[in-house]
Image (cartoon, rainbow, N blue to C red):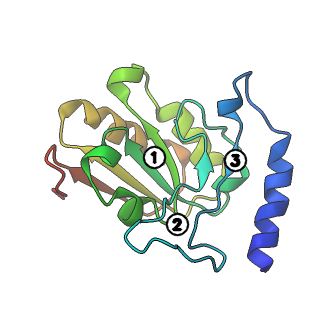
Amino acid sequence: VQESKKKKELQEKMKHLHEGGCPGSRMRMLEQPGEAGSNIAEPMRQAPQLRNWPVQIKLAPINAPYFNKAKLLIAADCTAYAYANFHQEFMRGKVTLVGCPKLDAVDYSEKLTEIIRSNEIQEVTIVRMEVPCCGGLEMAAKKALQASGKFIPWQVVTISIDGKILD
């Protein structure tokens, strides 16, 4: 009950923060079924694990309250489609950021550095596809971790095109 009250207070604070003119860019903390004592009526349906909005690295505000003491997931766009159990195995309990260095044609390292430097991030998980272009996302995340000046536990998980974890 206390945690739910804190989430509501945080949501109220975030209501007035808006970056840009697009309503889809407004920050949100999302409460999913299974949290705060709720039950899922359909046992075969997995509950989504998204905890924050926006999720695109380019759109994420650097000082969003949900980054405080967060476990950060930095994932390539395709990973959630290629790996069927992505929400349960990777997103559960984490703040999620996604991007595609090939499509966005941007180096995410500066933005990720500022997010890591400006917030109390507990750990970082990088999930990428086996394709070479996903190396850009991994390199940007590693560069950001180094440039932040913080020692934060991190790991990289690589997903194959046929949906298997390679390492």
Residue 28, numbered circle: 3
Residue 51 location in percent, x, y?
Answer: 59, 56
14 lies above or below 89: above
Which residue is disc 1 drawn over?
Answer: 146
Residue 65 location in percent, x, y?
Answer: 73, 53
Can residue 142 be seen in the rendering of this structure?
Answer: no
Residue 145 location in percent, x, y?
Answer: 47, 48
Q: Amino acid at mark 2?
A: Gly
Can residue 62 be seen in the rendering of this structure?
Answer: yes
Quick one: label 3, few (<14), some, or many (20+) residues within 10 Å?
A: many
Which residue is more in the foreground, 93 or 87?
87
Q: Which quarter of the rendering shows the C terminus? A: bottom left
Q: Distance from label 2 to label 3 (Cα)? A: 16 Å
Q: Amino acid at mark 1?
A: Gln
Q: Amino acid at mark 3?
A: Arg
Q: Distance from label 3 to label 1 (Cα)? A: 29 Å
